Amino acid sequence: MYFSNEQNCLIAKQQNETVRIDAWGTNALRVRVTQNSDFTNDNKSLSPSASLADISLNTPYSEIKNGKLRCVIYQSGRIEFYRENELILSEYSRDWTETQGHSPSMKFSAREFKPISGSDYKITARFEADINEKIYGMGQYQQPNLDLKGCILELAQRNSQISIPFYISNKGYGFLWNNAGIGEVIFGNNYTQWRSELSEELDYWITADDTPKDIIKNYTEITGRAPEFPENALGLWQCKLRYRTQDEVLQVAREYKKRGIPLDVIVIDFFHWIRQGDWSFDPEYWPDPQAMLNELHDMGVRCMVSIWPTVDRKSVNFKEMFDKGLLVRTERGSIQCFDFQGDTVIYDATNPEARKFIWDKAKENYYKYGIDMFWLDEAEPEYSSYDFDHYRYYTGPVLKIGNSYPKEHAKAFYDGMKASGQKDIVNLLRCAWVGSQKYAALVWSGDIKSTFTSLRDQLSAGLNIGIAGIPWWVSDTGGFFGDVRDEHFNELLVRWFQFSTFCPVLRMHGDRGPHDTPNLSGLDYGGGFSETGRPNELWSYGEDVYKILKKYLDIRLGMKDYIKSIMDEASKNGSPVIRTMFYEFPDDEMCWDIDDQYMFGSKYLVAPIMYQGMTERNVYLPSGSWKNIHDGIVYNGGQTIHADAPIDIIPVFEKI
């Protein structure tokens, strides 16, 4: 290795490989490796940084230091990272350059570049494993594992799966795989392996600090933070599959008003249009959107409308978008991308002209009436078949940059609304990537099953995506795919609503079967043809359920000032709204192992009921004093208590 200090970055060269390490943010370094003639100069998910480093050039090794993080690179090329003087991460190699006592005969390198075409490679990076390490973050995966050690994770976007490749470790560091390509990470017990299917260079970022809160602060400092959350969206969001007419929307809003129940948001779901890609109301069923919006606003209700990225070949916008190259391209065969209720192609959110096109249509056909918010569904985007090598975007093949799509989709609407002068922006998306939070993205967990198993998965999903930088997160209360004839559905709905009460947003939604409501028309297109689910309002499940749901809505409304304060904290330092126990109590070893309770901000400990028939559970209380919000009993912390949880109670304790 030949080392040099070039404009305050450490350069190491050997044969055809160049390593570049920069100070990048607070207590953080960015590492890039290329086998091309130069680096791409693409920051990808990172904001520019002017951090200064301390660099030492020596014969056996050289090092670069930025605050609490120090990196050593040896003559062999192996890289190690230290928090102060504690080794926290080291590359894994078993080849002739290895000096750590392992067999050199394996010829197993820490960094692999397998040429594919031109300057692109299939890239692998490997790091030594610590059997006792705990790993959290990485976005949202539909599994119960909160600690991801031992997991294999696909780095790809799917309906209900969100890849945000950042994690924090109990060893005191955070790591970002700064690559939007399709790939995989294995957090093995023998080694950790990252793989990108198609890239020009290896690129990752690492920070080290004293607490998880400090690490997240450093991370969001260079990837972005959520803006201020609108106070008039902290209450109940009402949604179902699907309100088919403006009369149905108004009838529901009027009933809430009649019952004296505050309603913050009502949502108009899919097929209010004639064809996908029209991005406008079907005038037969939505004859006067302006009058509808005026009445909703008079009642203090905001209105959200669903936007899909799909464009039917019979849409009024298809030909223009196709001719202008504003659609996703396929590498072979048909141009079709998605075949749900139409023959559709997907607009290309990575193309600035396409982003402007879709916003201009939304502004003319929705926003001008007073639509307050947009539901950017299928934001992954969803494909009929996730053959990632089959699609190409404006900025490159999906294999290479595909995971960034949802972030660019969020940007299209955020930029348009901001340019129009709106300040209280929040849009609902089904997917995200690194930095989506800065575009006012409220992420929901996708089309999930209405089961207690799924409910348990959502707790891990919500906690891990918060660590990955997305503080605004929500699930479909009661799950999406459900049938009201299930004898256990009402119990599930109540338990889920209780959980949602102590989440960033409280949103009723779901496809409530059976689908026995006749369609409004016999056509195979338009606002009247698609099915609708059963009613999904608070009063739709009988008086006993209604009383419990209303009780918890009242609890949430009484906490609005507190919820606003933790939303503001997310904007200030990147803190999640729902937090793992160790986030607030990092010195308590018990808290690093707890995966069935969480903190709602810094003040409330929530122990959700996630099993059918459960009416009691154990709750661990960290040090301090804790008051049961239901009966007022105060407990000393540092112990596990037994909490009763009849159907109308979710154990919640206030730190006092």
Image (tube, grey):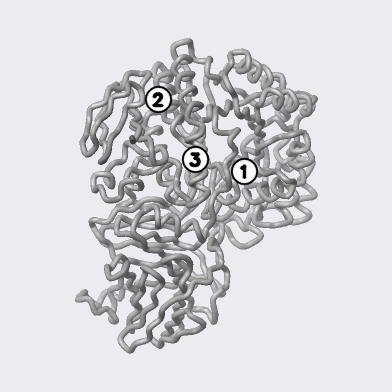
User: Circle 1 sits on which residue?
Assistant: 338
User: Circle 3 sits on which residue?
Assistant: 565
Placement of 607 over or under 63, stated as above or below: above
Q: Is residue 158 left or right of residue 90?
A: right
Q: Residue at x 36, y 18 (%)?
A: 647
Q: Quadrant of residue 204?
A: bottom left
Residues at circles 2 and 3 in contact by the CB criterion of under 8 Å: no
The one of 248 and 325 positioned closer to us in this rendering? 248
For the residue carrying disc 2, how many other residues have a C-alpha within 10 Å: few (<14), some (14-19), or many (20+)?
A: many
For the residue carrying disc 3, how many other residues have a C-alpha within 10 Å: few (<14), some (14-19), or many (20+)?
A: some
The one of 566 and 201 positioned closer to us in this rendering? 566
Disc 2 vs disc 3: which is toward the camera?
3
Image coordinates of residue 388 in percent, x first then y, are: 54, 54
Placement of 330 over or under 300, stated as above or below: below
Q: What is the three-letter code of the residue carrying label 3?
A: Ser
User: Circle 2 sits on which residue?
Assistant: 495
State the SS at label 1.
loop
> Which numbered dot is residue 206?
none
Q: What is the three-letter code of the residue carrying label 2?
A: Arg
State the SS at label 2.
helix
